[in-house]
Image: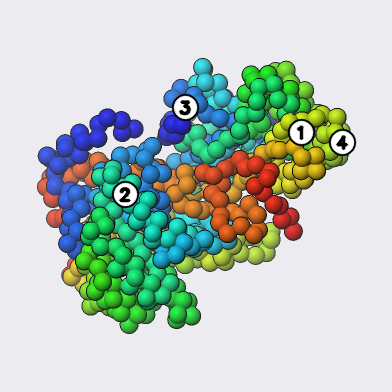
């Protein structure tokens, strides 16, 4: 795996709906072996405030064209800066970092469950899985209808995506985890991958455990170095664990069986 | 990237200007070191820089036994800085000596070990385990950490304790001992003098400044450990002031750091009295910065007719 620091040229940086952006970056030297679930660390702003890099999942990557895609949500100063970057400007990127999702056997039956901006890494994953002739089912939960802009990217891959919205304005009315729980019996999945709010991933993992289906999820933690040096992004996967994993290096992807959620 | 040109920039630099410095008997080929806890055990930064070019790599603080560290969240960004409460997570001295040290030595890296005993005896034992024979070049003694026997009071806040712990480690090792001073004291010069009297070969300063942040939504402190150490550009003026003060009062060399981000910062630290500098938080922002600063320092010297970097040490200090 060849991690490096590079300048990428922003091709397009557009607001898709309130507070959601998509960015396309030309970055020919980006490691062709980059895996779904890995992330990039971006310097937001030229000065010392914001100081630290910001982590973003590889949302999609076209190694032949050298194009990297990000999908991001406005949160604070770093993402605000990112949203202001004009096409043609360069941004400073370190990556690919972390461990991505493991690849299932070709032809495997796979369920993806995404929530909100957590859909980002699942697009690249879906692309890779379709290349492996996996049978994909995707469940995607959003708060508001207008966050569905991500959908057409999946549709272009030719995969089915079932949506759950809180207000019922599209698809299933309610939580994506309820939709997932209803469908899991008939789907007979071999493996499940999920990314989104932790409470959602905890529920997905719990349902998967009930049906004894293995799976993986992607965690977030504040990061400084992103490369495993500062030990800042530490967390315990199970409360009783003695050791802390480092989200940036040991993760961000972990298997359901490594985790025990404590949601109180 | 550093592919295949390992020696050429170094060769060029050594032919043109003299970057070497003396740090209390420890010879550094250039004054740029990587600060403890910000550079892991070096290997994490190999994709970004030829780490063997550094004056030294100061590795993560080592305790006697493995230490799991503090609860999450451990880091938080603040204005032009960051708070950390890592809690000295490390695998213990044996893993350092058996695994991490040989890896760095094989790559030609000059290694400064950083020790952080929880007790007086732990520091003695650690000091005795790290000798010249092990391949380590010097010991940085972190006295900014709590002394468990003294109810968690930091070694570095009491001049008597500083004198004793420095003296004890000096007695058991044949390596240069560089106490790393805590800035969380009212008069740093008293601590510096105690360390010098205890036999310190050089002083490292400054460690992080104690701080905190509040999560307004949750109405509680952000860090799992409540308090954390502030580092980064925000602390640079404090670090410079302390180094300036200490340089005036003591005779041993200073390894200075705190918020260094660029070559002008390096020069400020040298002119304030640092013989060498440590690069910490900047590594997180620009992973290749430490080696880049060596080149930029050499460029500065060429452009400004400075033959020896050591001539600039303390240049701005009125004695
Ligand atoms: C592995 C990983 C992948 C991610 N992928 C995406 C993605 O594809 N799209 C997306 O929109 N967001 C993603 N995030 C979250 C994203 O990193 C944060 O939203 C972003 O750092 C916020 O920065 P800010 O300056 O705008 O916010 P601020 O709140 O001002 O940031 C302050 C500090 O907190 C950190 N921080 C704040 N929120 C988070 C968070 N959720 N996770 C980690 N650090 C945080 C920032 O990095 C910064 O150091 C990912 C996080 C991780 C760890
Ligand atoms: C994440 C992190 C971990 C650190 N760990 C240690 C440590 O183990 N031992 C130590 O003596 N100093 C430690 N430090 C302090 C640094 O070595 C340095 O003295 C301090 O951060 C100030 O320099 P800077 O502003 O350039 O980072 C740590 C700093 C950070 C940010
Ligand atoms: S962010 Fe530094 S170890 Fe993960």
Question: Badge 1: how crowded within 10 Å, few (<14), some, or many (20+)?
Answer: many
- Marks 2/3 in contact by CB < 8 Å: the verdict is no
Asked if badges 2 and 4 are on one and the same chain, I answer no
Compared across the picture, whether B21 is left or right of A220 comes to left
Same-chain check, marks 2 and 3: no
Q: Which mark is residue A113?
A: none
Q: Quadrant of the C terminus of chain B?
A: bottom left
Residue B252 placement, left or right of B238: left
Circle 4: element type? helix
Task: Tell which of A169 and B131 is nearer to you.
Answer: B131
Q: Position of residue A44 (x, y in %)?
A: 50, 40
Residues at circles 3 and 4 in contact by the CB criterion of under 8 Å: no
Distance in Å between CA atoms under marks 2 and 3: 32 Å
Residue B239 sits above or below residue B105 on the image: below
Q: Secondary structure at mark 1?
A: strand
Query: In the rendered image, which residue does mark 4 sit on?
Result: A182
Judge if badges 3 and 1 mark residues of a common chain.
yes
- Residue A140: give its label: 1
Disc 4 crowd rating (10 Å Cα; few below 14, some 14-19, many 20+) is: few
The residue marked by circle 2 belongs to what chain?
B
Q: Nearer the viewer, residue A212 or B237?
A: A212
């Amino acid at each position: 795996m060849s991690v490096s620091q590079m300048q990428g040229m922003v091709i397009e940086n557009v607001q898709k709906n309130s507070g959601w952006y998509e960015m396309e970056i030309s970055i020919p030297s980006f490691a062709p072996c980059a895996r779904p679930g890995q992330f990039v660390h971006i310097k937001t702003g030229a000065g010392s405030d914001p100081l630290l890099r910001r982590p973003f999942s590889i949302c999609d990557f076209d190694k032949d064209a050298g194009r990297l895609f990000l999908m991001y949500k406005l949160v604070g100063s770093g993402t605000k800066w990112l949203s202001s970057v004009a096409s043609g400007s360069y941004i400073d990127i370190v990556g690919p970092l972390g461990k991505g999702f493991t690849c299932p056997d070709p032809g495997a039956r796979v369920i993806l469950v995404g929530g909100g901006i957590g859909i980002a890494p699942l697009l690249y994953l879906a692309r890779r899985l379709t290349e492996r002739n996996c049978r994909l089912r995707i469940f995607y939960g959003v708060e508001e209808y207008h966050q569905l802009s991500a959908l057409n990217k999946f549709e272009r891959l030719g995969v089915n995506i079932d949506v759950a919205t809180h207000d019922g304005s599209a698809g299933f009315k309610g939580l994506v985890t309820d939709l997932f729980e209803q469908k899991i019996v008939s789907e007979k999945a071999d493996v499940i991958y999920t990314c989104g709010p932790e409470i959602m991933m905890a529920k997905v993992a719990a349902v998967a455990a009930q049906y004894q289906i293995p799976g993986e999820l992607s965690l977030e933690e504040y990061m400084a170095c992103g490369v495993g040096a500062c030990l800042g992004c530490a967390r315990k996967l199970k409360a009783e664990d003695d050791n802390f994993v480092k989200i940036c290096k040991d993760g961000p992807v972990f298997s359901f069986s490594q985790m025990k959620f404590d949601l109180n | 990237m550093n592919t295949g040109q390992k020696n050429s920039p170094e060769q060029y630099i050594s032919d043109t200007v003299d970057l070497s410095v003396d740090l209390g008997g420890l010879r550094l080929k250039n004054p740029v070191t990587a600060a403890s806890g910000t550079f892991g055990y070096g290997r994490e930064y190999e994709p970004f820089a030829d780490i063997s070019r550094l004056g030294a790599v100061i590795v993560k603080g080592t305790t006697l036994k493995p230490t799991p560290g503090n609860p999450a969240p451990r880091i938080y960004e603040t204005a032009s800085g960051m708070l950390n409460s890592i809690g000295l997570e490390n695998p213990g001295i044996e893993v350092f000596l058996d695994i991490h040290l040989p890896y760095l030595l094989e790559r030609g890296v000059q290694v400064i070990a950083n020790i952080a005993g929880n007790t007086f005896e732990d520091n003695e034992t650690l000091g005795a385990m790290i000798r010249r024979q092990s391949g380590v070049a010097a010991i940085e003694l972190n006295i900014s950490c709590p002394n468990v026997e003294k109810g968690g009071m930091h070694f570095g806040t009491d001049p008597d304790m500083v004198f004793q712990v420095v003296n004890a480690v000096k007695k058991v090792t044949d390596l240069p001992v560089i106490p790393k001073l805590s800035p969380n004291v009212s008069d740093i010069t008293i601590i510096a003098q105690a360390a010098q009297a205890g036999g310190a070969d050089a002083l490292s300063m400054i460690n992080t400044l104690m701080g905190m942040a509040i999560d307004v939504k949750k109405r509680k402190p952000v860090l799992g450990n409540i308090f954390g150490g502030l580092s980064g550009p925000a602390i640079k003026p404090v670090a410079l002031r302390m180094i300036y003060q200490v340089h005036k009062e003591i005779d041993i060399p200073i390894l200075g750091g705190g918020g260094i981000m660029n070559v002008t910062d390096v020069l400020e630290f040298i002119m304030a009295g640092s013989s060498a500098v440590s690069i910490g938080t900047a590594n997180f922002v620009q992973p290749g910065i430490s080696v880049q600063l060596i080149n930029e320092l050499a460029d500065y010297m060429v452009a400004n007719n400075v033959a020896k970097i050591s001539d600039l040490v303390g240049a701005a200090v009125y004695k």
